């Protein structure tokens, strides 16, 4: 990121410049956020993608007035986070990782209290509560104690709590962590619906597919810095390449020579995978594919399988940090990673 | 106006939370009743002795028990605060424009109810055992002890917010509970003790609450002890509310 960011337009939903925050932990100073510059445009879904400990949550906590920054400036919904926290609080919603629904109370009590705290009248709060119950499919749950909710039900309530007062900017800290695929997909749809209604959404995630599919723009964060910023497609195109995987009908011993020949023909890097395929990393897949088939046809080699793999945001992270997002402390780091990049995009 | 509404909303929330936990209501009533049933009989033999004018053992003892009820009702406030910290409830509330003092007062007012209701029940029971009611002092007695409850409740909340851990809070609360109650002359008047004990007692703010409570229970409203009691409890409550509000305002990393 450039050290002198362009002046943030007054209309930006979120504008951060040179943001810094460090903590003293066990006698050591840990710089959680070390100079982040970002601008989030109104009406976009913006994602902070990074491993655990990258500084995503700290950044969000500064933006939501929970934590004072050590340096830099942050404006949210047209107000200065440090100078006018009260104004910022009225204009934003925040759904923390923990969620923070009151388990001792019912869903309705949670919603009504939140609405009233934001200054809605009792009647308005009730109307809004019923409206959100419909949007988030909470109807029958409203009279039940939150303690009895499932994880997905509680998450829906917590997002509803975050938007009770129709905030201009909604912050969500790892909103889908712990949700099953169906609940994740539902929540994504609901967030897209909010964006369509004009809400700016700023979320953190360590899921590549979430950043890729849900977010309009993504900032990849590592060790308190933004290492890459752009739309998911831009990032993938800028930082990585497509891959071609072909499985030729040849003996395993013939594979290395064939791989070298294909690499020469496409001026790309080639490698032999464990299951008898050749993998090529190419910049433009269409002419490369033609070249590959040209070589194979010339040698009269049959093709058992061929596919083009799209680059993933993990490739971007790998390029910028030298580590895979999976190995950088994320909760998924223990999962098997065979063909990880292709899987992520397909997931 | 907004502040009053918010305080009311938080008070209602806390009260509902308590009413849904009948265990607290039951122990809130049984503990003072047990003092009356199991400890007061021991004092009977002291009737007419030093510090106990004839026939007035309960008149000395009951105000002390009420102070204990007020102390206990307030000092429990910190535990739910830690739970609310851990479950993210406080973080969510702190992002709303809600007043931090209103947030604190919701709990304080609930705790005052949790003192006043068992306190009234205990007083009524004690009358049956021979406690002499003096209507002139009774409302002021409850007001004074409401201030003590407020001070304890706000202090306990502040401690919970600062210590952030049940273990730490439990150590502090149980650590101060015994010296504070012993040095206040709650169960037996300090006038029975040696000079050094009485001097130590004067350093304990709760001592003044107990002295004022005994005076008010006896119907003596316009005494120096009552004035001093209100002064000390008023200042203590104000200080604790300021401290508790500050703790709510502080960043919680």
Image (cartoon, grey):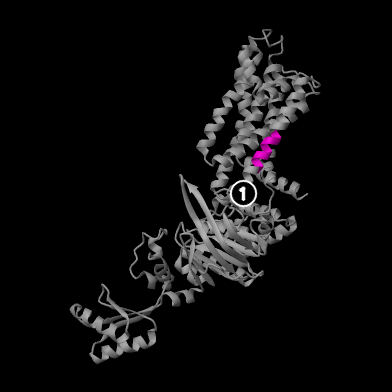
Identify which residue is drawn at 64% across, 58% down: A81
A318 to the left or right of B207: left
Mark 1 residue crowding within 10 angstroms, few (<14) / some (14–19) / many (20+)? many
Q: Nearer the viewer, residue A103 or A319?
A: A319
Place residue B31 in its image quadrant. Answer: top right
Query: Which residue in the protein does label 1 denote?
Result: A105
Measured from the top left, where is residue A124 in percent x and y? 73, 59
Position above or below: B8 against B220: below
Measured from the top left, where is residue A38 in percent x and y? 56, 66
Q: Nearer the viewer, residue B52 or A289?
A: A289
Q: Chain of mark 1?
A: A
A223 to the left or right of B58: left
A37 to the left or right of B140: left
As helix, strand or loop, the secondary structure at mark 1 comes to loop
- The residue stretch that appears in magenta: B237-245
Majority secondary structure in the magenta region: helix
Res. A215 visible in picture: no
Identify which residue is drawn at 42% across, 58% down: A331
Identify which residue is drawn at 61% across, 39% down: B158
Res. A311 visible in picture: yes
Residue B244 inside the magenta-drawn segment: yes
Identify which residue is drawn at 23% across, 90% down: A300
Measured from the top left, where is residue A295 in percent x and y? 27, 89
Residue lying furthest top = B49
Q: Nearer the viewer, residue A198 or A157?
A: A198
Measured from the top left, where is residue B195 in percent x and y? 63, 12
């Amino acid at each position: 990121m450039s050290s002198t960011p362009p002046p943030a337009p007054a209309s930006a939903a979120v504008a951060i410049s040179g943001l810094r925050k460090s903590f003293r932990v066990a006698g050591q100073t840990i710089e959680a956020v070390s100079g982040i510059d970002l601008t989030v445009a109104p009406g976009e879904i913006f994602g902070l993608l990074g491993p655990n400990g990258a500084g995503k949550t700290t950044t969000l906590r500064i933006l939501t007035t929970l934590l004072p920054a050590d340096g830099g400036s942050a404006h949210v919904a047209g107000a200065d986070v440090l100078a006018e926290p009260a104004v910022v609080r009225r204009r934003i919603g925040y759904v923390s990782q923990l969620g923070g629904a009151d388990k001792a109370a019912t869903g309705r009590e949670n919603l009504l209290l939140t609405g009233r705290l934001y200054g809605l009248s009792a009647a308005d709060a009730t109307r809004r509560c019923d409206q959100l119950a419909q949007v988030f499919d909470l109807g029958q749950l409203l009279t039940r104690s939150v303690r009895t909710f499932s994880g997905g039900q509680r998450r829906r309530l917590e997002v509803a709590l975050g938007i009770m007062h129709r905030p201009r900017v909604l912050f969500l800290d790892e909103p889908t962590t712990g949700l099953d695929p169906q609940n994740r997909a539902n929540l994504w749809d609901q967030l897209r619906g909010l964006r369509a209604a004009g809400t700016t959404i700023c979320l953190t995630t360590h899921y590549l597919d979430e950043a890729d599919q849900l977010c309009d723009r993504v900032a990849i964060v590592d060790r308190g810095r933004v290492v890459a910023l752009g739309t998911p497609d831009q990032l993938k195109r800028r930082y990585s390449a497509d891959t071609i995987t072909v499985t030729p009908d040849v003996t395993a011993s013939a594979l290395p020579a064939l791989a070298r020949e294909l690499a020469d023909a496409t001026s790309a890097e080639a490698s032999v995978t464990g299951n008898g395929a050749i993998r090529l990393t190419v910049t433009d897949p269409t002419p490369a594919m033609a070249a590959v088939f040209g070589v194979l046809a010339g040698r009269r080699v049959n093709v058992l399988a061929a596919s083009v793999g799209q680059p993933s945001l993990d490739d971007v992270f790998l390029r910028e940090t030298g580590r895979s997002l999976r190995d950088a402390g994320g909760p998924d780091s223990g999962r098997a990673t065979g063909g990880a990049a292709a899987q992520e995009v397909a997931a | 106006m907004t502040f009053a509404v918010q305080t009311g909303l938080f008070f209602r929330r806390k009260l509902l939370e308590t009413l849904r936990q009948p265990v607290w209501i039951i122990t809130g009533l049984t503990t003072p009743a047990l003092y009356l049933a199991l400890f007061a009989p021991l004092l009977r033999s002291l009737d007419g002795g030093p510090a106990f004018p004839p026939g007035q053992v309960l008149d000395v003892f009951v105000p002390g028990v009420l102070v204990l009820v007020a102390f206990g009702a307030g000092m429990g406030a910190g535990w739910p605060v830690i739970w609310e910290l851990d479950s993210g409830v406080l973080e969510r509330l702190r992002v709303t424009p809600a007043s931090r003092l209103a947030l604190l007062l919701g709990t304080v007012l609930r705790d005052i109810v949790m003192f006043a209701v068992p306190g009234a029940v205990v007083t009524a029971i004690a009358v049956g055992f021979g406690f002499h009611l003096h209507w002139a002092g009774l409302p002021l007695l409850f007001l004074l002890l409401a201030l003590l409850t407020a001070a304890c409740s706000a202090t306990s909340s502040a401690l919970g917010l600062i210590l952030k851990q049940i273990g730490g809070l439990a150590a502090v609360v149980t650590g101060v509970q015994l010296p504070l109650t012993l040095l206040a002359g709650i169960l037996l008047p300090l006038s029975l003790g040696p000079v050094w004990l009485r001097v130590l007692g004067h350093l304990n703010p709760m001592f003044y609450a107990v002295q004022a409570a005994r005076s008010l229970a006896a119907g003596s409203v316009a005494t120096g002890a009552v004035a001093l009691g209100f002064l000390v409890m008023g200042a203590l409550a104000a200080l604790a509310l300021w401290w508790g509000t500050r703790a709510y305002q502080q960043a919680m990393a």
